[in-house]
Amino acid sequence: MNAGMQQPVRRKLPPQYFHLVFSALMAALMAFFMTGVVTYVNVGLTEDFTTQWRHAFAVAYCIAAPMIFVLVPRVRRFVSRWVEMP
């Protein structure tokens, strides 16, 4: 690497935002894939598949995000009874 070139500064959110960002991203990924599969199984690749999938995703995300935010810490504590935490 050229000694005269500086690396761009990567800014990260402070650690107190980890749980919030983790919950939002996990909810989005799970809702995206699950609603896609369930919509496909229920209606197939119809002309309005993406419209139905978007609607299902919007509903699922509104439920999944707060549930993950609340449940992840409890599940971690529950699992830590049997497994050493990293």
Image (tube, grey):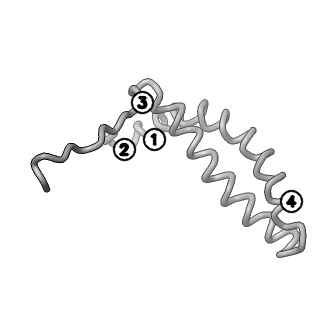
Find residue 82 and report its image quarter: top left
Task: Name the disc covering residue 79, or none.
Answer: 1
Name the side, left or right, on which 51 lies relative to 11: right
Query: Mark 1 or mark 3, which is nearer to you?
Result: 3
Q: Which residue appears at 24% of the width and 44% of the height? A: 7
Disc 4 from disc 3: Cα separation: 35 Å
**Who comes first in sequence, dot 2 or dot 4?**
4
**Front-lying residue, 40 or 10:** 10
Q: Nearer the viewer, residue 75 or 7?
A: 7
Q: Residue at x 56, y 38 (%)?
A: 23
Residue marked by disc 2: 83
Residue 33 appears in which quarter of the rendering? bottom right
| Nearer mark to the viewer, of 4 and 3 | 3
Circle 1 SS class: helix
The alpha-carbon separation of the residues under discs 1 and 2 comes to 6 Å
Q: Label 4: which residue?
A: 52
Q: Are marks 1 and 4 in contact (CB under 8 Å)?
A: no
Which amino acid type corresponds to the residue marked 3 in the rendered image?
Leu
Q: Is residue 4 above or below residue 33?
A: above
Q: Amino acid at mark 4?
A: Gln
CA–CA distance in space, label 2 to label 4: 40 Å
Q: Secondary structure at mark 2?
A: loop
**Residues under labels 1 and 4: Cα distance?**
36 Å
Q: Tag 1: Cα neighbours inside 10 Å, few (<14), some, or many (≥20)?
A: few
Task: State the residue at coordinates (36%, 44%).
Answer: 83
